[in-house]
Amino acid sequence: MSLRFRLICLIAIVLIASLAVEGTIVSFNASRSVQTEMNSALQVGQQIVTSALARLPESTDRRRDLEALVAAFKGNRHLRVSLTGGGAAAVAPSREGSHFGTVPPWFIRFLGIAPLAMQVPVVVAGQDYGGIVIETDPINEILEVWNDLGDGFLVLALFFGLNILLIYFFIGRALRPLDQLGLALQQIGHGNYKLRIGGNAAPELSRLLGSFNRMASELAELDEEKRLLNEQLLSMQEEERRAIARDLHDEISPFLFAVNADLAAIARLAKEGRGTEIAQEIQSTLDAVSHMQRQVKTMLGRLRPGILADFGLAAAIMSMVEFWRRRHPEIRFKTDLPSAEASFGAVIDITIYRIVQESLSNAVRHGNPAEITVSVAAVTADDHGQDRVIIAVGNDGHGMDKTAGFGFGLTGMRERVQALGGCLVLKREPGLGLSVTATLPLATPSRHVFNSSLAGGA
C-alpha cells in the first residue's frame, strides 16, 4: 500500500468519524427541538379548542360549529384533530415531500420522538357532544431534520471528495522526490556516484535530498580516491618489482654466472687432476654463494623485517632507534612503547613498523632535529567507539620543505594507514618541528580517512 493511499485512507477515516459524531450531535439536538415543537403545537391547539368551546353555548348549530372547529386545523403541520361522537370529523396534517426519499424507520426510532395526545370533552348545557382529540404528528419535523442532514451530508461529501482529489494530487506532487530518491538509490547501488537530485521540494524532503547529494558526492570522492590508490598501489608494486629485478640482475645474476663458471672450472680441473687449484675454485664459489645469501637476506628484510618476526614489535622499533642513534649520537631519542611481548596482529605490526621507519628516516634526513620522540600506545574504546592504536613520531627540527610534494615514503605511509581504515595526520608547529600521528583501528574498518595540515612532504 502506497504512502499516498495510506494518507488518503487516514484522512477518510477522520472525516467519516467526524461526520458520524456531527450527525449524532445534530440528531440529538434535533430530537429535543422537535419534541419542544410538538409540546408547543399541542398547547397552541389546546388553547384554540378551549377558546372555541367557550363560545359554543351561544351557537345555534353546535354540531356544525364543532365540525368547523376541527376543519380549522386543516393545513396544520403538527397536529391531527378529530371529533368523537355523532357526526365525527377528523383532520390530519399533510405530508411534505423530500428530495432524499422517505424517512427510514430506523431514523425515526433513533430520534425517539413519541406522539403526544390529549382529549377535550365537549359538554354544553348538559348535552354531551363527544370530545375533540388533539394528537401531535412529528413526521413533518422529522422530515425537515432528515432533509437538513441530507443537505449537510451532501455538502460534506462534496467537500470530502474535493479534499481527496486535492490530497491525491498535492501529496503525489510532494512525494514525487521520494520516487526520484528511490531510483537514485538504485543507481547508487549500481555504482553511479555522479547522480544528483535537484528541483523544488518540501523543506523536510529538501534536507533529505541534500543529504543524498552530499552522500553521493562523498561516495564519488571515495571512489575516485580508491581508484587513485589502486593506481598508486600498482605503481608501487611495479616499482618494488623493478627494484627486486634490479637487485637480482645486479647482485645475484653475476654471482650465479660466477658460480656456474667456477663449477665448470672445477669439473675441468678434476679431469686434469689438478687438485690444488680445485680448492681455490671451491673457495671462490663459496664466496659467491655467501654474497648471494647476504643479498637475498637484505631483499627479504626489505619485504618483511626479520627482527619483527623474531623478537616482536617493541624490539624491532628499539633496534631501528639504536641504528639511528649510533649514526647520529647528537640526537636524543625518547621512546614510549608497548611491552616486549605485545602484538596487534601481523598486518598492524608491520604497518606500525613502516610508519616509524619512514618517520625516523624523514626526521633525520630532512629535519635536523635535536630530539626525536617515538610513541606507540593502545587505547581502549568507549561505549561508542572501538579499540585503536596511536603511533606518534615527533621532532623539534625545522621539518620538511612545504613546496615539496608527497614522495613515495609518505605516499606509502598514507596508503598503509588508509588500507586499514585509519587516520594519518601530519602537522608542523612552530618550535616543535614535524609530527606524524597515525591512528589505526583494532577492528574491521568502516571508512578510510586521511587528514593533513602539512602542505608538502618527502
Image (cartoon, helix red, strand yellow):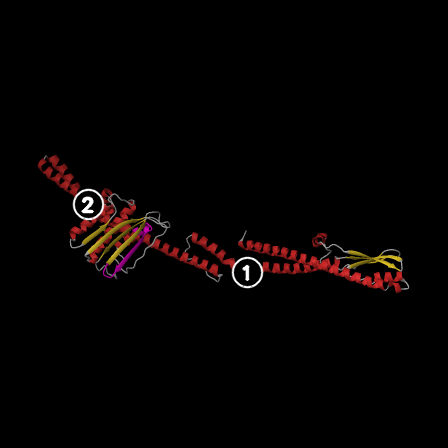
Judge left or right: residue 64 versus residue 425.
right
Can residue 63 be found in the magenta stretch? no
Q: Which of 124 and 378 is in front in this view?
A: 124
- Which quarter shows the C terminus? bottom left
Farthest residue, direction left: 276
Can residue 431 be found in the magenta stretch? yes
Q: Distance between the residues labelled 1 and 2?
A: 78 Å
**Residue stretch in magenta:** 416-432
Amino acid type assigned to the residue bearing label 2 in the image:
Gln
Secondary element at tag 1: helix
The location of residue 168, given as percent across then percent down, is 56, 58
Amino acid type assigned to the residue bearing label 1 in the image:
Phe
Identify residue for label 1.
Answer: 170
Indicate which disc residue 295 carries.
Answer: 2
Q: State the image quarter where residue 34 is shown.
A: bottom right
The location of residue 356, given as percent across then percent down, is 24, 51
Q: Nearer the viewer, residue 110 or 119?
A: 119
Of tags 1 and 2, the one toward the viewer is 1
Secondary element at tag 2: helix
Regarding residue 404, the answer to whether it shows in the image is no
Q: State the image quarter where residue 367 is shown.
A: bottom left
Q: Which of 381 and 198 is in front in this view?
A: 381
Q: Earlier in the sequence, mark 1 or mark 2?
A: 1
For disc 2, the neighbor class at 10 Å (few under 14, some 14 to 19, many from 20) is some
